[in-house]
Amino acid sequence: MRINRILSLVTLFLGAAHLQAQAVSDLDYEGRQNYGLKMGLGINSMYGGKLQNPRPTVGFMAGLYIHTNPEKKPSPWGFQSGLDLRMRGSNFANAKATDTAINSAYTKISLMSLDLPLLVNYRLSKQRDKQIKQLQAGVQLAYNFNSVLYVGPQKRPLATATETYNSIKEWDRLPLKMCDLQAVVGYQYRGESMGYSMSMKMGLLNLNNNFLLRGLVDTDNDGVGDQEVELISPTTDPLKEKPGTPQMIGTWSLEFALVF
């Protein structure tokens, strides 16, 4: 009987010590930062009927974040925003082993964007816990300031201006809309000095801006482009699309980031 009481007291003591170790001191509690840095990588791809055979690719991101401190309030709800620089896009299984670098098989599209996340946080942990665990949901505004198309098995960048030929130095913007809107759901963990976040993002807008790339091709092998043709294939001919309803070019990503 005495042993049971002793074990009960020890268990109660260890439990109290554990809870105390998880609680933030008054000084730390009031001084918790609500801003920081984040960096990570994501699995990205495109979807929709316009571009054919999309496959995931890996992209990178880095940014700043700022959030309210719901752990300082009885309410578990809070808000988070920031500014991110992100590289995303998609691979495409269109090239054959015999394809050359400059031909009609596109194999990758890269998008460089400046993003503004607008997220609502819901705290799962207790108010004064050292480790903050929270669910996140909201939207992310994206400004696609540059885009590059790659061709052939070696995924070499291709210029899209009709006055250039066989150029890998000039990276012209693709006929994609510059603004995107993504729905976001995720989970975030913040420790005393470092944490992480995981999120799923799905593009809600159609980026198709009459997506058709034409360029000069050397038909007589004299080193000079002399015939204008559609450079990439397979895509859907815009003339076959219904007026006002271009086929979808959307984006999605699964992202993991460290937060500091």
Image (cartoon, grey):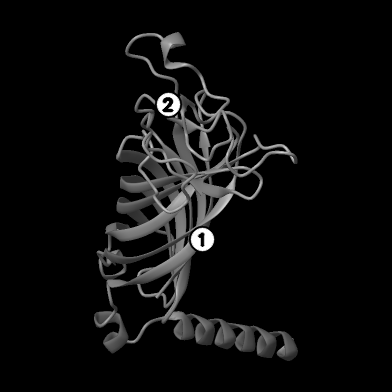
Q: Pick whichever, 11 or 201, lies toward us.
A: 201
When asked about the image quadrant of residue 69, the answer is: bottom left
Helix, strand or loop status at disc 2: loop
What's the mark number on residue 212?
2
Which amino acid, by three-letter code, is at mark 2? Leu
Which amino acid, by three-letter code, is at mark 1? Leu
The answer to whether the residue labelled 2 contacts the one labelled 1, judged by CB atoms less than 8 Å apart, is no
Name the spot of residue 99 as percent of width and height, x first: 69, 39
From the image, tell me which residue sits under label 1.
41
Name the spot of residue 112 as percent of width and height, x first: 38, 52
Q: Residue at x 47, y 16 (%)?
A: 237
| Mark 2: few/some/many CA within 10 Å (<14, 14-19, 20+) | some
Q: Pick whichever, 140 or 131, lies toward us.
A: 140
Q: Residue furthest front?
A: 222
| Number of numbered discs visible in the structure rendering | 2
Q: Residue at x 52, y 87 (%)?
A: 17
- 93 to the left or right of 13: right
Q: Quadrant of the N terminus?
A: bottom right
Q: Pick whichever, 2 or 118, lies toward us.
A: 118
Of callouts 2 and 1, which one flags the residue occurring earlier in the amino acid sequence? 1
